[in-house]
Each structure stands twice: as C-alpha cells, then as structure tokens.
Amino acid sequence: MSVELDPSALPARKLSCSTAETAKRVRVDARVVALVPRFDAPFFQAGLAGYSDGAMRIIARRHGCPFCVTEALLDRTLLNGGRGKIREDPDLIASECGMGDVEDNTAATVDDHPLAGQIMGTTPHEMAAAALLLVEMGHDVIDVNLACPVKKISANYRGGHFLAHPADATVILRAVKDAVGDRVPCTVKLRRGFDDTKEMADAFERIFNVAYDIGYAWTTVHCRTVEQKYLGPGRWEFLEELVARHPDRVIFGSGDVWHVDDIFAMMDQCGVSGVSVARGCIGNPWIFRQAREMMAGRAPTAPTIQEQRAALLEHFDLAMMLYGEGATGRRMRKFGIKFAAHHPSAAAVKAEFVRCESASQWREVIERHYRSQAGSAQ
C-alpha cells in the first residue's frame, strides 16, 4: 500500500467548536467499555495491511493507544496454519520475552490486549471456523472485514466486494456470530458502499442494519467507496448522515484521519462514537499520546529526537522477535521512511532509510540522525 502522510485538497470541516474543546468533553461510549473494559479512549489503531503487526501495535500501546486491530487475516490461511496463525497470536511477543504472567506482561507494556482479530474470506463455514480459531488464540474481539478493496478472485467475493452482495454478506455475518456466540464481541468493518449508486447505498444500509440486528456490537465505517480504494478525499458527510439516522448505535468513523486534530474534528462533525486511526498512525504512534493530552486539556506535544530514537529502536527489537534479523531489516525500512517525517531533517533521513537493505544499515541511520538527547522535531 502506497501511503501519503500529508494529503492535500481535503475539504473544509464543519466544526461546532475548536478541536481542543471537543477533546476535553468527549469520552468513549460506555457500551464499548462494558464489552472491552480496557478500551478507555474514543480512538484506536486500525488494521493496516502490511503494517499493523504485533510490533507496531505494542509501540502504539506504549504511546496511549487503547485498542488495536490486526491486519485482515485470510480465513483459509489461518485455518491452514499460515502466517496469520503464527504471528498474530496476541501473546506471542510477551511469551518470547519470557515474562510469563499476564500481570508482568502488562507492566512491561508487551501485552497486546485488547486486540481485535480481523478476518476476511469467502465462505461462511471457513469464516466461522477462522473466527473460532482467533477466539481460541486469545483475541478479545472478532472483526469481520467487509471493507478491503482487494481484487476479486474469479467469482468469489472477499472484503469490500461483499458490499455489492448483501444477501451473501448477511450469510457471512450470521455464520461468524453463530460460531462465536457471546464468547467475545463481534464487530464489522465497512465502507460507505461498493460505489456511489443508489443500488449500492441500499445494499450498504441492508448490511449495516443486519449487523446490529443479529448482535454485532459496533461497526467501523470508512467514508470512501470500495471503488475509490484510497484515492481522493473521504466523505465525512456520509458518516454525519449515518449517525443522524442511527443515533442509538455505536459507530466508529474512518477516513482522512491524518493528524491528532482530525480525531476530534471527526467526532465533532460526524457525531461518531470514536475514530479508527489508519494511515495517520504509520510511523506516528505519538498521535495517541497527543490525543490523550488533548483530552486532558493540554496542548499536544511533538516527539523529541530522543523519543523518536527510543520508538524506532523498540520497534526494531520487537520486529526482531517476530521475523529475525534478515526480514526485520527489510520490513523496518518502510517504517523508518514514515518515522522520518518527524525529524527536523526529514527529507535526508527518509532518503537514507530508503537505501537501507539490512538491519545494520538501518541501525547506522539511527546512530547518524537520532543521537541528540534534546530538542523536538518540528
């Protein structure tokens, strides 16, 4: 996924007050806390293809993120014992650290809970079986992905393609909920429609209503269509209208949340219960700390060079536990590129991360550019 960090041409927001004022008054919906007690703030880290693994999630948690979602895990891959089953165990990093007790893991902030296991697939029985597997692995929530704009494989639907086929989507949702029962909450990730036709708007509404009717706890709705993918601005107005039609439902919003102010702007304009932070948190775990600072009535603080260094090294060490040295060097290159945006010499640091091909080269960039113990990245 090609990721912009500072998009242009976003529409003006319709705010009732400053984002600082909104931040001081908003809280997470009590119904969410009742189901997931540690979900204590109205924002979370979204599932991000190729990014939101255990290492990224734990770094986000260390900076104030209350809840995370795995990247979309294919049901068949999970059931066949593939990468998702091996590396998306929420207790894997904690067990690799050899800390043992849950209380010790929590104190050391290597505890990857609460965590939603997000599943994506085609057939009801495999989706149901994959959901059960994730429950058995210790995931706290099961999230069904009916949003991802993946390619359709032959005549089979996956992800956002189900939004064009509401009857089939309903069967999937019922199969997962029936399998999981009340063991953990079930939730759904949606886009505002497959496209912008009236037919697809009706299909969205049908799937959206069925989810709540059969007991899904909340939906997270991305305000772009499947056909849009990640291009062009999202329509916050759609979220605003959706919440107005369904004020009694827990609805999280997603789309064009790039900076901490956007979290509270979306809550103000759209009235959503909370906000899913996606591309805006890649290489930027501080967005969660900043959001908590604003909720406490303080100005958000930029990360110092020392804080950037610590986050980069901690992220690297966690990735090493998951992938080993060879793969970690390649994987961390894309994270370094995003982290570089906070450095005073952002362009130069990014260029050096781009050239990294090994773990040793990656560490050399850190030593060259992140040695200062003072000063803030502006």
Image: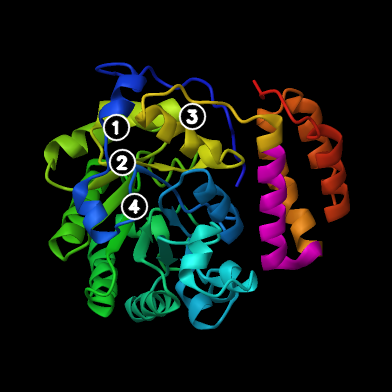
Asked if residue 153 can be seen in this view, the reply is: no
The image quarter containing residue 179 is bottom left
Q: Which residue is mark 2?
A: 274
72 vs 25: above or below: below
The image's mark for residue 305 is: none
Q: Nearer the viewer, mark 4 or mark 3?
A: 4
- Is there CB contact under 8 Å for labels 1 and 2? yes
36 vs 255: above or below: below
Say what amino acid the circle numbered 2 marks.
Gly
Q: Which residues are magenta?
A: 308-325
Helix, strand or loop at disc 4? loop
- Is there CB contact under 8 Å for labels 4 and 2? no
Residue density around tag 2, few if under 14, some if 14–19, many if 20 or more, within 10 Å: many
Say what amino acid the circle numbered 1 marks.
Met
Distance between the alpha carbons at the discs numbered 3 and 2: 15 Å
Q: Nearer the viewer, mark 4 or mark 2?
A: 4
Distance between the alpha carbons at the discs numbered 1 and 4: 17 Å
Q: Position of residue 197 (x, y in %)?
A: 28, 41
Residue density around tag 3, few if under 14, some if 14–19, many if 20 or more, within 10 Å: many
The image quarter containing residue 307 is top right
The image's mark for residue 259 is: 3
Front-most of residues 255 and 363: 363
Front-most of residues 102 and 35: 102
Q: Position of residue 216 (x, y in %)?
A: 22, 61
Q: Of label 4 and label 2, which has the lower sequence position?
A: 4
Helix, strand or loop at disc 3? loop
Q: Nearer the viewer, mark 1 or mark 4?
A: 4
